[in-house]
Amino acid sequence: MNNNNSTTDVSVIKNTLLHNLSNLFIDPNKSVEIVSKGFIALTGLCYLSGIVVVNIYLSYYGIYFFNLFKIEYITAGVWAFIPPTILMIFCLMIYTSGKTLYNNIITPLINKNRPRWDSFLPLITIATTIFIFALYLYSLYKSSVHSLLHDIRLDKYDLLMLASYSVCTFIMINLFIRSKSGYSAIFTLCMTIILSSSWILYFSEFVYNKIPKYLGGGSLTEAMITLEINSAVANALKYADIKFIEVDNIDDALYNNNNNFSADKLMLTTNKTHIILETDKEYYVTNNSLIVSLPKECIKAITYKNKFIGFSPNHGAGDTF
């Protein structure tokens, strides 16, 4: 009895989705409502998946940080789902053009019937759409966006996983829409959830850290940090093997500053280090060994590497990048 109820519920959900999709193109009054609800649902999906991505990524560094109000969650979710969505749209175009070609042209030829001239119109429309879509992607690639996307260092395994997830998910969604029974709908829905969960885990571990911070990713940010040194901060940085530009031995510099009874606090700038995370109260930095949490009140300045113009000796310490 419970199985029948569950299959009925899935069938109702599927019929509701198909009804809303049909209204999207038929009823203009409901189009705005459906699009707005879809946008809200997509934003919520990106936000929730972004929470999972960011926290799994930080857990590999031993950092456990949770804040409901972080824009990084949405950007991480967008990076996780927008590229597969674009590939699925491309798969839909190819699938639709192939189906149209078979039904309107190949089938009449097999039956020794001459295809009607208007049978070519849907195929021409779809082919034109694919051409414009490919042309748009090419122009985007050749534009200034290419210099930004060039910093995303994806290898062939990442691209293979992205393509596999997109194609398999497209097939599962298509089977879900075409399913005749509740059991087949449940199966395809469960497979879609499993595929999406596997992609999220893979994206969190192998892809998110290859997307630059300025694009909303999780790659480490190269920087030099100028901070006010006390014994606690000095010991933490020493144990993490983070060096300073001005001195070779932080203990000697701290000892001399204390013995000279200087009214000024000891201010030093680190060599190139990497910022993992910024919170409201602290920065998490690393030098590829240990991770140090630095309170914001002791940090006086941060020098970032400029991706586009770089650094020169005229910029002072920045040439150490």
Image: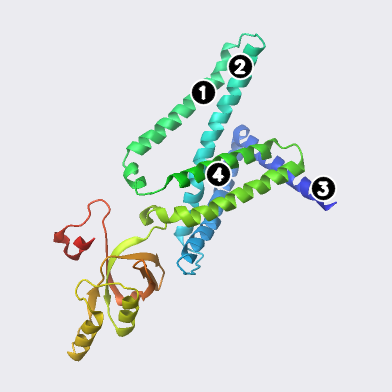
Q: Is residue 40 at least partly visible in the picture?
A: no
Q: Which residue is mark 2?
A: 106
The answer to the question of whether label 4 and label 1 lie on touching residues, with beta carbons closer than 8 A, is no
Pair 3/4: label in front: 4
- Farthest left residue in view: 314
- CA separation in Å, label 3 and label 4: 31 Å
What amino acid is at disc 1? Thr
Quarter the C terminus occupies: bottom left
At numbered mark 4, what does the secondary structure look like: helix, strand or loop?
A: helix
The answer to the question of whether label 2 and label 4 lie on touching residues, with beta carbons closer than 8 A, is no
Q: Quadrant of residue 120?
A: top right
Q: Quadrant of residue 104?
A: top right
Crowd class of label 2 (few under 14; some 14 to 19; many from 20; radius 10 Å): some
At numbered mark 2, what does the secondary structure look like: helix, strand or loop?
A: helix
- Residue drawn at the location 46% of the way across and 54% of the way down: 206
Colouring rule applied to residues: rainbow
What amino acid is at disc 4? Tyr
Q: What label does residue 125 carry, if any?
A: 1
Picture coordinates of residue 191, whole percent (x, y): 65, 47
Picture coordinates of residue 280, whole percent (x, y): 41, 71
The answer to the question of whether label 3 and label 2 lie on touching residues, with beta carbons closer than 8 A, is no
Dot 3 or dot 2: first in sequence order is 3
Dot 3 or dot 4: first in sequence order is 3
- CA separation in Å, label 1 and label 2: 17 Å
Q: Which residue is mark 3?
A: 4
234 displayed left or right of 70? left
Q: Is residue 301 at least partly visible in the picture?
A: yes
What amino acid is at disc 3? Asn
Pair 1/2: label in front: 2
Dot 1 or dot 3: first in sequence order is 3
Q: What label does residue 165 carry, if any?
A: 4
